[in-house]
Image (cartoon, coloured by chain):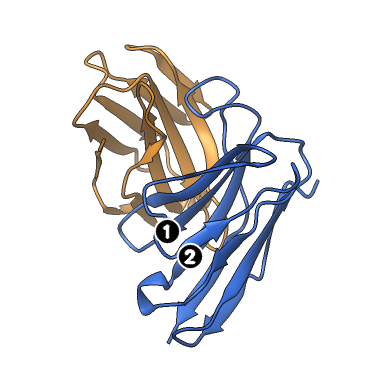
Chain colours: A blue, B orange
Amino acid sequence: NAGVTQTPKFRILKIGQSMTLQCTQDMNHNYMYWYRQDPGMGLKLIYYSVGAGITDKGEVPNGYNVSRSTTEDFPLRLELAAPSQTSVYFCASSPGATGGASGELFFGEGSRLTVL
Amino acid sequence: GQQLNQSPQSMFIQEGEDVSMNCTSSSIFNTWLWYKQDPGEGPVLLIALYKAGELTSNGRLTAQFGITRKDSFLNISASIPSDVGIYFCAGQGGAQKLVFGQGTRLTINP
C-alpha cells in the first residue's frame, strides 16, 4: 500500500539553486495538491491539479511551478530557491474534489527543504 | 480569503484527561474536517462533518459541526500516549478551496 510517495524526504539548497520535489500516487486519484507547512501556520495550498494536463494556482504559488503529465505524478519545481521557501512540503491526492464525501485528502510523508 | 482560527495552539495534559479544541471561521463553511499529524508524517483524516449541527464520533474522538456553520469542536476522551501529535481543523465553503487551521499541538505526560 504505497499511497502517496514523496521524494526526497530532506534536502538542503543554496540560494538560487533549482530543484524538483517528486510526488507519485498509486490510487488513481484525479485530484492532486501541493501544500507547504510552516510552524504555527497550518497548511497553505501552493498548486493543485484536477486531472492530467490541468493545473491551477493555490494560495501561495509564487516561486513554484508544477506539471501534471500523468494521473500518477505531480512534481513541484522551485526555480530560484529563496530562504522564504524553507518549509515542509506535503503532496496530497483525493478521488474527488475537497468539500465532498469523496474529497478526503491522502497525504505523503512530507519533504523538508532548507534553503541557506 | 477565508481564515480559520484554531485554539488552543498547544496543550500539555496528563494521561487520562479529556481534551477539547475548536476552530472558528470568519465565514460560513459547508464542510469541517479534523486531521491528526504524527511526528514526521503527513496529516491523516480523523473525522469529516458535512451538516450543521452534526455530531460524529470515531472511537474516543467526537467532533461537532457548529449550528452557525462558523465553528467546529473536537473532543478526545481519556487521552493515551498515542494521542500525541498536531491536530488540524480544515473547512471549506462555496467555491473556495479547503482552508486549514494553525494546528493544536498536544503533549501528554504519562
Task: From the image, tell me which residue sits under label 1.
Answer: A37
Image coordinates for residue A94, horizontal then vertical, percent: 62, 35
Mark 1 closeness class: few <14, some 14–19, many ≥20 residues within 10 Å: some
* As drawn, A47 above or below A51: below
**Residue placed furthest toward the front:** A53
Whether residue B63 is visible to the viewer of this picture, yes or no, is yes
What amino acid type should be assigned to the residue bearing mark 2?
Val
Residue A88: numbered disc = 2
Q: Quarter holding the C terminus of chain B?
A: bottom left
* As drawn, B4 above or below A85: above
Image coordinates for residue B93, horizontal then vertical, percent: 35, 24
The reply, left or right, for residue B5 in relation to residue A90 is left
Task: Tell which circle, 2 or 1, labels the residue nearer the N-terminal end.
Answer: 1
Residue A91: numbered disc = none
User: Circles 2 and 1: CB distance less than 8 Å?
Assistant: yes
Give the Cα separation between the discs numbered 2 and 1: 5 Å
Image coordinates for residue A43, horizontal then vertical, percent: 41, 51
Residue plotted at (47% across, 25% down): A99
Depth order, front residue of B20/A53:
A53
Q: Disc 1 sits on a residue from what chain?
A: A
In the rendered image, residues at marks 2 and 1 fall on the same chain? yes
Mark 2 closeness class: few <14, some 14–19, many ≥20 residues within 10 Å: many
The reply, left or right, for residue A79 in relation to residue B23 is right
Image coordinates for residue B107, horizontal then vertical, percent: 38, 57
Label 2: which secondary element: strand
What amino acid type should be assigned to the residue bearing mark 1?
Gln
* As drawn, A18 above or below A106: below
Depth order, front residue of A26/B62:
A26
* As drawn, B45 above or below A75: above
